[in-house]
Image: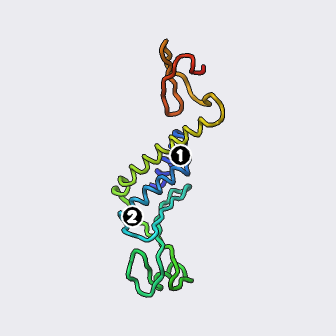
Amino acid sequence: MNSDLIAVLDHMEREKGIPRKVLIEAIQASLLSASKKSIGPARELEVTIDPKTGDIKAFSKLIVVERVADPYGEISLENARKITSKAALGDEVTKEVTPKNFGRIAAQTGKQVVIQKIREAEKISYSVSTRDGSESLSAGSSGITTSRMSSLIWGGLKGLCPPGTVPS
């Protein structure tokens, strides 16, 4: 999965022009949503993705207590000291809570969020590209030209322009 994730990130960055950081944030948001369903009501849940290796981990911040009343928000002093030897009562300890397998349900849950974020990122990418201060497009091509209209292709966008307005 990790090498597949890196390959997808590379492809989307290269083909769609979406920065890797934006893609990782989108995937993290979708996995966070999916994690909340598979892990349960964990306190301050966070999902991280290593941009180089594609390793995905989920973490929860737990309060160190003497007796655990809420297993999703608290951790015993004994268990907290296994994570960090300096843990004391009342401290906050970050514990990895990555499910063994996010599985198909997690992937499907996150799919729509990822698609939405990618579309948002593409729109931002196109709008930023046009705000360079010039009146012309920096990269694009004109397609079929008739007496009424000319087609213009720019990145993933296609449009129609009156003849004479498309640069040659």
The amino acid beneath tag 2 is: Lys
Percent of width and height locating residue 133: 66, 34
Assess whether mark 1 and mark 2 are in contact (beta carbons under 8 angstroms): no
The amino acid beneath tag 1 is: Asp
In this view, 137 is above or below 13: above
Residue 99, quarter of picture:
bottom left
Q: Of helix, strand and loop, which one carries label 2? A: helix
The Cα–Cα distance between marks 2 and 1, rounded to whole angstroms, is: 28 Å
Q: Of helix, strand and loop, which one carries label 1? A: helix
Question: Looking at this rendering, what residue extends furthest in the right direction?
Answer: 133
Of tags 2 and 1, which is closer to the observer?
Answer: 2
Percent of width and height locating residue 121: 51, 45
Q: How is the image coloured?
A: rainbow
Q: Which mark is residue 10?
A: 1
Quadrant of the drawing holding the C terminus: top right
Residue drawn at x 54%, y 22% as measured from the top left = 142
- Dot 1, how many residues are within 10 Å of its Cα: few (below 14), some (14-19), or many (20+)? some
Residue drawn at x 39%, y 66% as measured from the top left = 100
**What residue does disc 2 label?**
36
In this view, 72 is above or below 21: below
Question: Looking at this rendering, what residue extends furthest in the left direction?
Answer: 105
Question: Looking at this rendering, what residue extends furthest in the bottom direction?
Answer: 66
Quadrant of the drawing holding the N terminus: bottom left
Percent of width and height locating residue 161: 51, 22
Residue 167, quarter of picture:
top right
- Dot 2, how many residues are within 10 Å of its Cα: few (below 14), some (14-19), or many (20+)? some
In this view, 47 is above or below 90: above
Residue drawn at x 47%, y 45% as measured from the top left = 118
Residue drawn at x 43%, y 79% as measured from the top left = 74
